Image (tube, grey):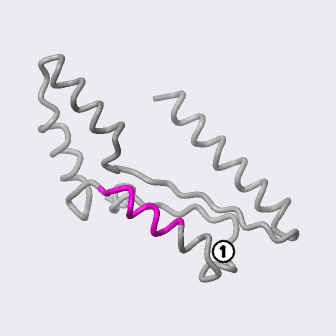
Amino acid sequence: MAHYNITKAGVIALSRSLAMEYGGKGFRVNVLLPGGIMTPGVERFAKELIEKGRDPTESMQRFAARLPLGRMGNPDEIARIALVLASDLAIYVQGALVTVDGGFLSA
């Protein structure tokens, strides 16, 4: 997980720097922090576990139980927040980290 955490921290630091440097030039830079999203990659990973004789159901249920919403998210739920940030509804939002994880970080 070190490579994942380091690259995520790098993206956050880069986006904050870009927000500071280019905000005055009309650019809005914000970061979405998704978590627990049922993507094709997650589905592939579950299939690989099944092929190896392991059942992913229990670990996925344990993960979902940690979410205050009690379920994995779907990509459309991330896209909706991206749409708001890209619109004039978020015209004064700059350098923000927007967590879209079903409450995982708060649990």
**Magenta span covers which residues?**
73-82
Q: Nearer the viewer, residue 34 or 44?
A: 44
Residue assigned mark 1: 93
> Residue shown at 13%/38% (left/top)?
57
The amino acid type found where label 1 is placed reads Val
> Residue shown at 69%/79% (left/top)?
92
The quarter of the picture where the C terminus appears is bottom left
Q: Is residue 102 left or right of residue 100?
A: left
> Residue shown at 62%/65% (left/top)?
96
Q: Residue reaching furthest top?
A: 52
Rendering coords of residue 99 (x, y %): 47, 61
Q: Is residue 22 left or right of residue 33?
A: right
SS of the residue under disc 1: loop
Rendering coords of residue 106 (x, y %): 37, 61
Q: Quadrant of residue 103?
A: bottom left
Q: Nearer the viewer, residue 56 or 88?
A: 88
Q: Total label count?
A: 1
Label 1 crowd (10 A; few <14 / some 14-19 / many >=20): some
Rendering coords of residue 19 (x, y %): 76, 61
Asked whether 30 falls inside the magenta stretch, the response is no
